[in-house]
Image (cartoon, helix red, strand yellow):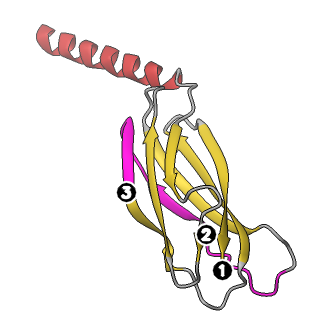
Amino acid sequence: MKQFKCIIAALALLLMVSGCENDNDTISPSVEMETPAIGQKYFRGQIIYLNAHFSDEGGSGLKECVLGISPVLKGWDDPWRPDEEIVEISGSTQTLENYIVFNGEIPYDIMSGSYVISVRVTDNNGNLTQFSRNIEIE
């Protein structure tokens, strides 16, 4: 019985220490994105691929990457506005290669022009990194 109490106490201490470590994570995740590149030109019917490396130095681990796209100019009749896409990521580092975003091909029936791709990356402690990239669609 004494051994059992010692094991329970050791497990409780381990859980407390690991829980405290994650609570102290105040470091936002980092992202190195190769594509889409800034100002990259796409044509309707093409596929946009995400090639990026995510890392979390704070210790709580990566949670998700949320991708969105919106037109730069407002008032267009038919801009491309797909729903935000959530990509589950995990661990302290993860690389996505040739990940197809926004359900495949760029629609043919949209307005061409400048668009902004937004990227929000969070870790399991809620720390956030966000940025955007301008691209062109013809």
Name the residue carrying label 2.
41
Which residue is painted at 39% across and 16% down in the image?
Answer: 17
Task: Say which quarter of the image contains residue 11.
Answer: top left
* Rendering coords of residue 123 (x, y %): 50, 39
The kind of secondary structure element at disc 2 is: strand
- Mark 1 element type: loop
Q: Provide the residue designation for mark 3.
A: 97
Q: Amino acid at mark 2?
A: Lys
Which type of secondary structure does the marked residue at label 3 adopt?
strand
Q: Which residue is mark 1?
A: 138
Residue drawn at (57%, 38%) of the image:
126
What percent of the width, then of the height, locates residue 128? 61, 39
Left or right of 79, for residue 76: right
Q: Quadrant of the C terminus?
A: bottom right
Residue found farthest to the bottom: 109
Q: Earlier in the sequence, mark 2 or mark 3?
A: 2
